[in-house]
Amino acid sequence: SAVISQKPSRDICQRGTSLTIQCQVDSQVTMMFWYRQQPGQSLTLIATANQGSEATYESGFVIDKFPISRPNLTFSTLTVSNMSPEDSSIYLCSVEDGESGSSSGANVLTFGAGSRLTVL
Amino acid sequence: GQNIDQPTEMTATEGAIVQINCTYQTSGFNGLFWYQQHAGEAPTFLSYNVLDGLEEKGRFSSFLSRSKGYSYLLLKELQMKDSASYLCAVRDRNYQLIWGAGTKLIIKP
């Protein structure tokens, strides 16, 4: 299955600053997904990053707040801009891994280890 | 709206069996997933159901009833390493993944 390297693993940030999270995959993938996981809550999809086109954002998330880059088929970044304490969360990147799900016919998601952000 | 319900927390004893339930109300259905997430780590895939019935994979089994909007994950011969959160997720008619908040399973010796 795909191996995803995500960094930073954690950071403490000041209000009003921005932080960029990087995600590197060991194989070429068409789509990369960025999720947020707040304590005790479900995974929430922020956006889908496609190589060569603008990211597709879910309801409630906007490009100005969460700009995404996708320069090639193995790499993406998510920036959390002008952070506030409400942005404190775990941010995860993921890809659909046909290899790990092929025996069941499912498009299984493989996740990076996550980036735990704390905004003071 | 779309909704996935699962218990917030469950406790079980090492060596025993535990069943984690998941009920869903979604716009259409294109498969149900269970993921395991240890504290501080990424979710990892456990099982997938798209047809009614039981899927068995070693100590873990997952059941689906589409007519009832219901699934469960059954864990047998519990080990301490099974202490984790278990996430239920459903693909709707648009192939969007809808996630439950997860069930934190605590295993006691």
Image (tube, coloured by chain):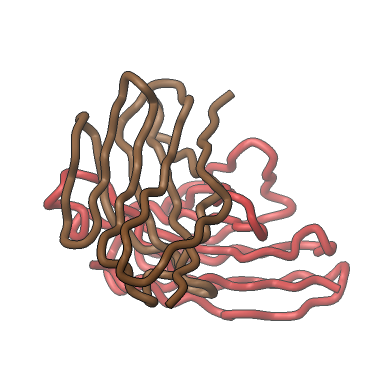
Residue located 45% across and 65% down the image: B37
The one nearer the camera, A80 or B28, is: B28
x and y, in percent, of residue B77 in the image: 26, 66
The one nearer the camera, A106 or B4, is: B4
Residue located 23% across and 45% down the image: A106
The one nearer the camera, B35 or A57, is: B35
Residue located 64% across and 36% down the image: A59
Q: Could you tell me which quadrant the C terminus of chain B lies in?
A: bottom left
Left or right: where B56 falls relative to B102: left
Chain colored brown? B
Count up the numbered dots. 0
Q: Could you tell me which quadrant the N terminus of chain B lies in?
A: top right
The quarter of the picture where residue A80 lies is: bottom right
x and y, in percent, of residue A88 in the image: 74, 65
Chain A colour as displayed: red
Residue located 38% across and 72% down the image: A4
x and y, in percent, of residue A77 in the image: 55, 66
Image: A44 above or below A5: above
x and y, in percent, of residue B92 in the image: 40, 29
